[in-house]
Image: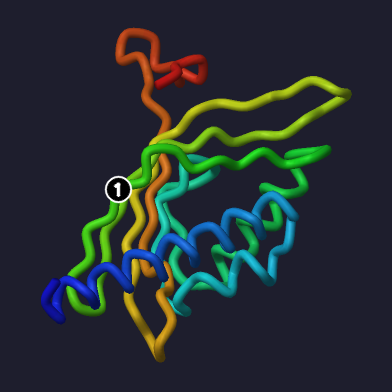
Amino acid sequence: MNNETTLETQSDAAIRDALERWRSAVTARDIDGIMAHYAADILSFDAVAQLQFSGAEAYRRHWQACMEMCKGPMIFEIHQLSLSVRDDIAFGHYLTRCGGVENGQEKTSWMRATVCLHEIGGRWLIVHEHFSVPFDMQNGKALFDLKP
């Protein structure tokens, strides 16, 4: 294994660890823990509420609103994570099952996610993410019942 491959493998492991800590913060409803994984200039195309969120403060408000909407225990799973890492930039995509448990009933859906990270000050931070839900073009409705 050459030096470049070793660094990419180490970076891959560090990114997967960071995304797992971020995911754990989401399920714990820990807003500070969630936001610790974003760069100050995060640009997010979330699937909920508006076209984009620019900057950490705007995205923090969005995360707080999401936590208020979802009552009960949070469900947030990352499936089929694929990463491409070069130097201090990484690109990834995955499927996520997210939602919560309300009155003992699970309310979740699958979404697609794309994430871009930048190594800043020795930490991999999310600089861009995009969540989306497929929709039916004939009726304009989101397809929340799709499964991988």
Along the horizontal axis of the image, is 54 left or right of 56?
left
Q: For the view shown, which residue lies furthest in the bottom direction?
A: 121
Of the 4 image quadrants, the one containing the C terminus is top left
Apparent side of residue 37 relative to residue 80 in the rendered image (left or right): right
**Mark 1 surroundings within 10 Å by alpha-carbon count, few (fewer than 14), some (14 through 19), many (20 or more):** few
Point 32% across, 73% down: residue: 10
Task: Measuring from the top left, give residue 96's x and y in whole percent.
Answer: 48, 37
Query: Please, which residue is most extreme toward the front here?
Result: 1
Give the residue type that dot 1 points to: Ser
Residue 36 screen position, x and y as percent? 58, 74
Q: Quadrant of residue 69?
A: top right
Task: Reply above or below: 100 against 22.
Answer: above
Please give left or right for residue 138 compared with residue 44 in the image: left
Of 136 and 30, nearer the camera is 30
Residue at the spot of label 1: 82
State which quarter of the image contains the N terminus. Answer: bottom left
Residue at the far right in the pictured view: 103
Position of residue 50 relative to residue 75, above or below, is below
